[in-house]
Every structure is written in structure tokens, then in C-alpha cells.
Image (cartoon, rainbow, N blue to C red):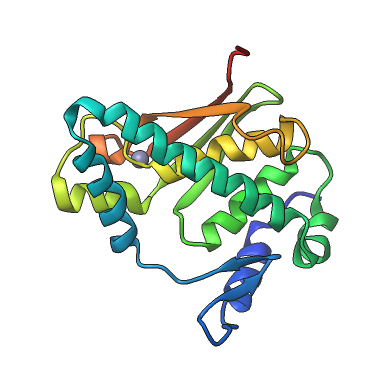
């Protein structure tokens, strides 16, 4: 059975209506909350700006690494949750199907329209995205960028591959790293994230 993304998106949307007293959404075994993308973008792009032009690459790496570590822990929680076992696991036939499950959850979280366009098991994955909030936010605030700006999704792409093909949790994080060769913030038609296995040291 192929992964029915719509079913997963619907379940997340329904489940996210439940809020604890502090606004936390207890869903898929992890704690979620509604968060302003404008605020997230403000923190992230101001962090980059304040580190200055000489440390641009360092700032980008730190933001991508933070997202990768967060994505790694979050989606490990998600795939071990009761909701995943009930809803997604019955649709999974191959290890690779997990990525479609992850992507459907990510779409429901509001991270963009995400599609996996290429997968070389254990080696490489390409995700294409429309309407990522980081690219939109950057364009609105600063205009056209020189480099890709979707640091969060770049980290998450690496995390998905870490979870599938890295060592068992928690030792597999940063087995892969992703680049963003195309980004709407640079004027490209869509964003693309290419995760590859990191050369071993
Ligand atoms: Zn982008």
C-alpha cells in the first residue's frame, strides 16, 4: 500500500485542535505548538545578520545543524508514537515509505508543499518544495538572496536520511548533510534540498 499523505495530513490537522493549558499540542508522541513564522524568521535571519558578513557560512551551518538535530529527535519521536503505529505504520511496506510518511507530517505542520523527487537508498535524496516560509519571509523582508535561505528544511532533509540510513538513534545524527542548490529566495522557481551521505572523516 502506498502512503496516503492526505490521510496523515488530515489526522494531524484534526489532532492539532487539542491544546493543553499552555498551548502545547500533544500529538505523534512529541510536543508541538503553534508558532509565528515571522518570529522564527526574525530570529533566524537576524542571527545570521548579527554574526556579520565574514561569518555568513558559519551562521548558516549553525542554523542548519540546529534544524537537523531537532528534526532528528522530533521525527524519531513521531515514528515511535502511538499515532504513527495506528495510522502510518500499516501503510508502510518499505523502509523508504517512511520518508513519504515524514513528508506528509511535515506538510501538515505547515512547512511547505514537499515532494521527494529522487532517492538513492543509503546515499542521496532530493526534496522539492514550494512556498517554504523561510524563502517567503526572506524575500518579503530583504529581497532576493545570494544563497539558499531555507535552513530549517535543509536540516530536516538531512535528518530524514539520518533516521533511515544512519546508525540507530541517537548515534546517527549528521551522517548526512543537505544542500539547497535551488531556492525561491534566490529567484528560483522552487526550493530543492539534496541530502547526501557525508564523507567519513
Ligand atoms: Zn529555499
Residue 105, image x, y percentages: 61, 58
Report whether 48 appears left or right of 30: left
Report whether 53 appears left or right of 191: left
Identify whether 110 is placed above or below 3.
below
Residue 128 in view in this figure: no
Identify whether 146 is placed above or below 159.
above
Residue 103, image x, y percentages: 59, 50
Residue 85, image x, y percentages: 82, 61
Q: Residue at 49% across / 45% down in the picture?
A: 67
Residue lying at the far bottom of the rendered structure: 21
> How many circles with numbers are drawn on the protein?
0
Residue 100 in view in this figure: yes
Q: Residue at 62% across / 54% down in the picture?
A: 74
Say which of 114 and 134 sits in front: 134
Say which of 125 and 161 sits in front: 161
Report whether 94 appears left or right of 54: right
Report whether 85 appears left or right of 18: right
Say which of 188 and 160 sits in front: 160
Residue lying at the far front of the rendered structure: 51
Q: Residue at 53% across / 41% down in the picture?
A: 68
Task: Give the quadrant of residue 43.
Answer: bottom left
Q: Looking at the figure, which quarter contains the C terminus?
A: top right
Residue 16, image x, y percentages: 58, 76
Task: Give the quadrant of residue 198.
Answer: top right
Say which of 116 and 199 sits in front: 199
Q: Residue at 64% across / 57% down in the picture?
A: 5
Identify whether 155 is placed above or below 74.
above
Quarter of the rendered structure image containing ligand 1: top left
Amino acid at each position: 500500500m502506498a502512503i496516503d499523505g492526505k490521510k496523515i495530513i488530515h489526522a494531524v490537522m484534526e489532532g492539532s485542535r487539542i491544546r493543553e493549558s499552555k498551548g502545547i499540542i500533544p500529538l505523534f508522541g512529541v510536543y508541538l505548538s503553534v508558532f509565528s513564522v515571522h518570529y522564527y524568521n526574525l530570529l533566524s535571519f537576524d542571527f545570521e545578520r548579527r554574526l556579520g558578513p565574514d561569518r555568513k557560512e558559519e551562521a548558516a551551518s549553525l542554523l542548519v545543524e540546529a534544524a537537523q538535530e531537532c528534526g532528528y529527535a522530533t521525527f524519531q519521536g513521531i515514528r515511535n508514537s502511538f499515532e504513527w503505529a495506528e495510522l502510518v505504520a500499516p501503510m508502510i511496506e518499505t523502509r523508504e515509505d517512511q520518508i513519504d510518511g515524514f513528508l506528509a507530517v511535515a506538510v501538515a505542520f505547515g512547512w511547505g508543499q514537499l515532494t521527494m523527487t529522487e532517492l538513492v537508498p543509503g546515499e542521496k535524496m532530493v526534496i522539492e518544495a514550494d512556498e517554504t516560509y523561510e524563502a517567503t519571509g526572506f524575500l518579503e523582508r530583504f529581497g532576493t538572496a545570494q544563497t539558499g535561505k531555507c535552513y530549517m528544511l535543509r536540516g530536516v532533509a538531512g535528518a530524514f536520511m539520518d533516521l533511515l540510513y544512519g546508525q540507530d538513534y541517537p548515534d546517527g545524527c549528521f551522517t548526512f548533510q543537505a544542500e539547497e542548490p535551488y531556492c525561491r529566495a534566490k529567484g528560483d522557481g522552487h526550493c530543492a534540498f539534496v541530502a547526501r551521505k557525508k564523507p567519513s572523516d
